Each structure stands twice: as structure tokens, then as C-alpha cells.
Image (tube, rainbow, N blue to C red):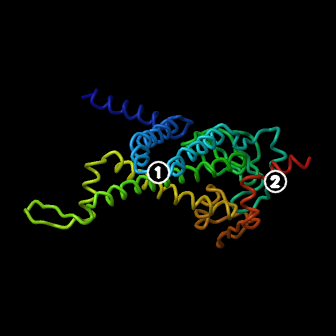
């Protein structure tokens, strides 16, 4: 009976340590999963979709488009994962503090990071995954195993949009192939005998079942990339909104949460602090800040 209580407690402790290592430290697990899923999609696309579409005389440039997007995506992935996101150190701290003003609501002057022992510049945050403070911190991306900050935000932006385009083009080409198969076979004008022995006209459900039995891997891949396109498309739109309004994911989340909080140092206890984005420079200026952050512009002037 004693062992029956000790063993589950030990297993629980081990599970907690594993989960902590996965979600609170830098790990390549999600990077490996990312590569495996991407490789599986492209192997299936090359092995079946590309070959069948080539036989059906699809235009070669259309069939090569997913590979061109893959090349660009891999390049952005490497740059995003290997680039310095904007780590705040003692040597660059003084210059980074001058770049953004403190808004007094989300970012206050005089807050010291207990881990890095440095005053936090406005728009910065300490990342518990990487154990460092990052300038213009957006979020820690497990898929590239790196923080997204001022210095690599442009690479993440391009990585995300090329990834979405990859999924979308693969889905469109695969769907076009299946539609072409249906049109060439003339199934839309046919009929079938159901379980009760009655003759029925071919409907959409019958076509999907027939295509799944004929091309199971292609249909499964198509469903996966359609779902991926929807998810990535929504996230890409959200990141585009953040870029055009000069916000980070961290700031957007904190501003939503701050609407339910009080700021005792700035306003009386019975009044709610009002958050206003003071960093916006207009649509074009905000977009340019992603690709040419102020730190880069400042260093060029010197």
C-alpha cells in the first residue's frame, strides 16, 4: 500500500519536470515536429500530386511555386531562429533605453529586471525561456526556438507569411487536381446504387468518399493544409494588424488585461488607468519599423 502512494507521486514529479523542461526552457522538440510535418507534406506533394498534375499538363511554374516558397521559408526560418532578437546587455543598455519612451501604463521607468539586474527599457520584457531581456519583445516562438524581438521581427513576419502561402498553394493545387479528376471522369453526371438498392444521383458526399478511397493520402493532406491555411491565415492577419498599429503581441495582451486593472502610481485608486498606444507612427511608418528598427537607423547615423 505504501508503494501504491509513492510511485504515483514519483511519476507525478517526473511528469512535472518533463513539462517544465518542455514549456519553460528552450527545446528543439517543436522545431523537429515542424520539420517533420513540413517534410511529410512535401513528400506527398512530390510523390503523388506533382506527378499526377504533370500528367494532366498543369503549368510547370504553378507546380514549382510551393518549392520556391519552401526555399524562401527555410531561409526566413534559419534567419529567424539564428538571429539575435535584440538581447539587452550592459553594453547596449544605455542606447536601447533612449529608443522608446515610457508610456507610464504598460511600461514604467525604474523597473529593474531581477534576473538581468538591468532597468527594463520601454517595450522590453524578460523571456523565461531564454533567460534574457529582449528589446521590443513580441513573444517566444517555440517553432523557431527563439524569441521574436526588434532585430528578428522582420524575419518572423516573412517566415509566417511564406508558411501561410506554402499551405495555401499546396491546398489549391491539390484541390485543383481532385476537381480535374472528377471533371474528366464524368462522375458528376453519373449515379450509384445505395445500400437499399435504390439508384441515386452522385452528390458531394459520395464524391468525397470516392476520392478518399481512390487518393487517401492526397485527401488527408488536403484536409490538413486547408486547416493549416485557415489557422496560419488568421494568425498572419493578426500579426499584420499588430505591425500596422505598431504593437507587439506582449503589448496587445497586456493592454487587454490592463483594462481590468488599476494603476495606483498614476491615478487615484477609484479611477482606471487609460492605455493609449504612443508608439504608432502611421501605417507606413509602423510597417517600416518592422524592417528597419530604430536601433539600426540610429547606428547608421552615427
- Left or right placement of residue 266 versus residue 242 in this view: right
* Residue sitting farthest toward the right: 302
Can you identify the residue that label 2 sits on?
Answer: 99
Residue 195 coordinates in the image, percent (x, y) = 10, 59
Q: Nearer the viewer, residue 274 or 300?
A: 300
Q: Secondary structure at mark 2?
A: loop
- Left or right placement of residue 224 versus residue 89 in this view: left
Q: Nearer the viewer, residue 274 or 31?
A: 31
Residue 115 coordinates in the image, percent (x, y) = 68, 39
- Left or right placement of residue 78 versus residue 64 in this view: right
- Look at 50% across and 48% down and name the residue there: 63
Q: Nearer the viewer, residue 273 or 185?
A: 185
* Residue sitting farthest toward the left: 197
Residue 269 coordinates in the image, percent (x, y) = 66, 69
Q: Nearer the viewer, residue 271 or 56?
A: 56
- Look at 76% across and 62% down and name the residue there: 285
Q: Secondary structure at mark 1?
A: helix
Can you identify the residue that label 1 sits on?
Answer: 170
Residue 211 coordinates in the image, percent (x, y) = 29, 53
Amino acid at each position: 500500500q505504501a508503494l501504491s502512494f509513492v510511485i504515483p507521486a514519483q511519476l507525478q514529479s517526473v511528469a512535472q519536470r518533463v513539462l517544465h523542461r518542455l514549456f519553460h526552457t528552450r527545446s528543439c522538440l517543436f522545431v523537429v515536429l515542424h520539420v517533420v510535418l513540413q517534410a511529410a507534406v512535401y513528400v506527398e506533394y512530390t510523390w503523388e500530386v506533382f506527378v499526377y498534375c504533370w500528367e494532366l499538363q498543369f503549368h510547370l511554374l504553378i507546380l514549382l511555386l510551393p518549392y520556391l516558397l519552401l526555399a524562401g521559408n527555410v531561409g526566413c526560418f534559419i534567419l529567424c531562429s539564428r538571429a539575435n532578437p535584440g538581447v539587452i546587455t550592459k553594453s547596449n543598455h544605455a542606447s536601447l533605453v533612449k529608443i522608446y519612451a515610457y508610456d507610464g501604463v504598460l511600461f514604467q521607468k525604474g523597473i529593474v529586471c531581477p534576473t538581468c539586474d538591468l532597468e527594463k527599457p520601454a517595450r522590453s520584457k524578460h523571456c523565461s525561456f531564454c533567460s534574457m531581456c529582449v528589446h521590443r519583445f513580441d513573444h517566444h516562438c517555440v517553432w523557431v526556438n527563439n524569441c521574436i524581438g526588434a532585430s528578428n521581427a522582420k524575419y518572423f513576419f516573412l517566415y509566417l507569411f511564406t508558411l501561410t502561402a506554402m499551405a495555401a498553394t499546396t491546398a489549391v493545387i491539390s484541390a485543383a487536381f481532385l476537381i480535374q479528376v472528377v471533371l474528366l471522369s464524368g462522375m458528376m453526371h453519373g449515379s450509384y446504387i445505395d445500400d437499399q438498392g435504390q439508384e441515386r444521383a452522385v452528390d458531394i458526399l459520395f464524391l468525397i468518399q470516392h476520392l478518399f478511397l481512390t487518393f487517401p493520402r492526397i485527401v488527408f493532406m488536403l484536409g490538413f493544409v486547408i486547416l493549416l491555411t485557415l489557422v496560419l491565415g488568421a494568425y498572419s492577419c493578426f500579426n499584420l494588424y499588430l505591425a500596422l498599429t505598431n504593437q507587439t503581441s506582449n503589448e496587445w495582451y497586456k493592454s487587454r488585461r490592463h483594462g481590468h486593472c488599476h494603476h495606483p502610481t498614476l491615478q487615484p485608486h477609484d479611477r482606471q488607468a487609460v492605455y493609449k498606444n504612443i508608439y504608432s507612427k502611421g501605417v507606413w511608418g509602423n510597417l517600416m519599423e518592422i524592417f528597419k528598427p530604430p536601433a539600426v537607423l540610429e547606428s547608421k547615423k552615427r
